[in-house]
Image: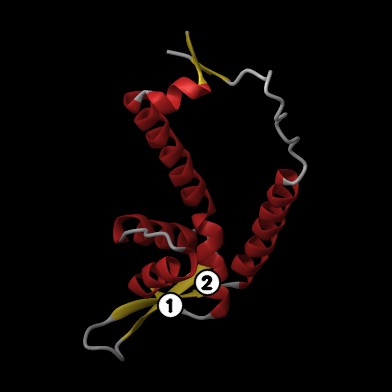
Amino acid sequence: MHTWKLSETFQNPNLFLFWVVELRKHESRLWNGLLPYLILKCAEAQSLHGYELIGLMRKRFGVYFGPSTIYPLLRLLEEQGLLTSQWSVKAKHPIKVFTITDDGRDAAIVLATMVQAVSRFEGQIPQEPTKPERHNVITLYH
């Protein structure tokens, strides 16, 4: 176990980069955890295909998920009965269009409730003291 003061983190470029990478990992986990909910919410508004969903996520949420993330999740949501799909031949080539099911709408409501609960919890987190005598210490376990 090694302990650093928070002020040392910003003075040490390697330690600062370590924390940036760690925070990005948490951000990525958060987005991946929310992804099924976001897909269902987007599908509530309209039927859509994978690349359309990728563009919509980037536009609405400012985050990029590639086809290797989106398509397996679309298939999983379809296997779970939350989405259905059918092939559309309106474009130059056939595309698979996904539509939300009644079970998918119900799941979106449950997931929305969970997201709202987390959102309410955030407002209840006690604020950190700002007194000068407070020591900022970060403990890392190796």
Secondary structure under badge 1? strand
Q: Quadrant of residue 68?
A: bottom left
Q: Is residue 70 left or right of residue 92?
A: right
Residue 96 drawn at (x, y percent): 35, 76
Q: Is residue 120 left or right of residue 6?
A: right
Disc 2 marks a residue whose amino acid type is Cys
Residue 40 drawn at (x, y percent): 55, 66
Residue 42 shows which numbered tag? 2
> For mark 1, what is the residue?
48
Residue 76 drawn at (x, y percent): 44, 57
Q: Residues within 10 Å of mark 2 (few under 14, many from 20)?
A: some
Secondary structure under badge 2? helix
Along the line of sight, the residue nearer the viewer: 32 or 129:
129
Cβ–Cβ below 8 Å for labels 2 and 1?
A: yes
| Quadrant in which the C terminus appears | top left
Residue at the image point whose x is 47% and y is 64% from the top? 78
Q: Is residue 76 left or right of residue 135?
A: left
Q: CA distance from mark 2 to mark 1?
A: 8 Å
Q: Is residue 81 visible?
A: no
Residue 60 shows which numbered tag? none
Residue at the image point whose x is 67% and y is 20% from the top? 134
Which coloring applies here? secondary structure
